[in-house]
Structures are given as C-alpha cells and as structure tokens.
Image (spheres, rainbow, N blue to C red):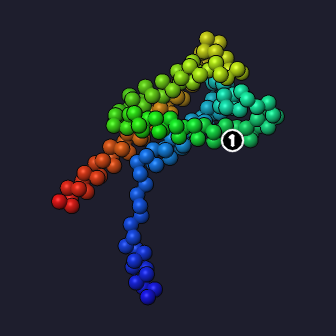
Amino acid sequence: MGNSDQRLEQNKQEEPISVLSRSLLTGFVGGLLGGFFGVVLYYFNFSEVSPKSYLLRSWLTASWVDGWLGTVLSILMIGVISLLTAFIYFILFKKVNSLWMGIAYGAALWFIVFYVIQPIFPNIPSLGDLNANTIVSTICLYILYGTFIGYSISYDYTDTLHKLRSEEERNK
C-alpha cells in the first residue's frame, strides 16, 4: 500500500503558477529591489529623496520612522505598491516584448511620482527644487525598475504562450 501511494504522489503534477501570479511576484521583488536601491541612493547622497520621505514621513512624525524600522517598512511598502504597477503593466503591455516599453514605463512612473502626485507629499521638494543628482539618479532607478518589471513580464508571457503552443503541437 505504501509503495502505490508513493507512485501516485510521484505522478501528481504540480499546478503551474499562472502568468499573472508570476507577474505579481516579479512586481513585488522589483519593488523590494527598487526600494532598496532608492535607500542606497539616498544613503550615498545621490538623491535627496528617500523612500521613507514619500511613504512614511509624509504622514507620520514618530521617531521610529527615521530608524532602520522605517527603512525596512518603506521598502516593504514599495514592494506592495509595486504589485499594482506590475498588474497595470500586465494588463496594458504584456504582449509588447521590448526593452523600450519597460524603459518608457519606468520613465512614465518617474513622471507620475515626481510631478503628478508630488503635491500630496508635503515634505518632498517640487521637481524644480530638486538638484540634478536627484533627478538623474531617480530617473535611472525608475528606468531600471520599469525595464525589470516590463521585460520580465513580457518575456514570461511570451515564453508561456510559446510553451503552450509547442505542447499543443506535440499533442496533435
């Protein structure tokens, strides 16, 4: 009896993770990496804006916000917010398998964060008041983020379609 149970267990195929689930995971990981590198840019004075400035300091005045806990919580929050950006990319651009779409997506996200929604963050300087290092380094970070999200999602979508078509042809 034990031997047949093992064979049945071996014959079970794991349910594949959907492309959307992998895209959301990509978004979360991209957000964690982007948040981490945003903190690094701030720490080494490449940027005068830290992730904490946007997410926590705008609404909280507690002392823990300026410590390591605020940094870790900000990075995690960026990972969660990044789920939304990955979902939007998945819905709108998953079929566009090009680095340029990811670059454009990252630049568009930068414009939205630093120009469109900036007024709701009172402690962040306006775009005209930011120094050149901050502008250049954050644009580069957002472009890298957009490229990571965009190309990963598009590649995964295209690869999954290719595998499904190959499998269908083998089953004919």
Instruction: Single out the residue that lies furthest toward the right.
Output: 63
The part of the image, by quadrant, that contains residue 77 is: top right
- Residue 5 sits above or below residue 60 on the image: below
**At x 30% / y 47%, what residue is drawn?**
161
- Disc 1 designates what residue? 72
Relative horizontal placement of residue 7, taking residue 77 as reference (left or right): left
Relative horizontal placement of residue 63, taking residue 127 as reference (left or right): right
Could you say where residue 170 lies in the image, as x and y percent from the top left?
21, 59
**At x 79% / y 37%, what residue is drawn?**
64
Q: How many marks?
A: 1
Could you say where residue 19 lies in the image, as x and y percent from the top left?
40, 48
Which one is nearer the viewer's eye here, 158 or 41? 158
> Type of residue at label 1?
Val
Whether residue 58 is visible here, answered yes or no, is: yes
Image quadrant where one finds the C terminus: bottom left
Could you say where residue 74 lies in the image, as x and y percent from the top left?
67, 37
The part of the image, by quadrant, that contains residue 82 is: top right
**At x 36% / y 44%, what residue is drawn?**
157
Image quadrant where one finds the N terminus: bottom left
Whether residue 150 is visible here, answered yes or no, is: no
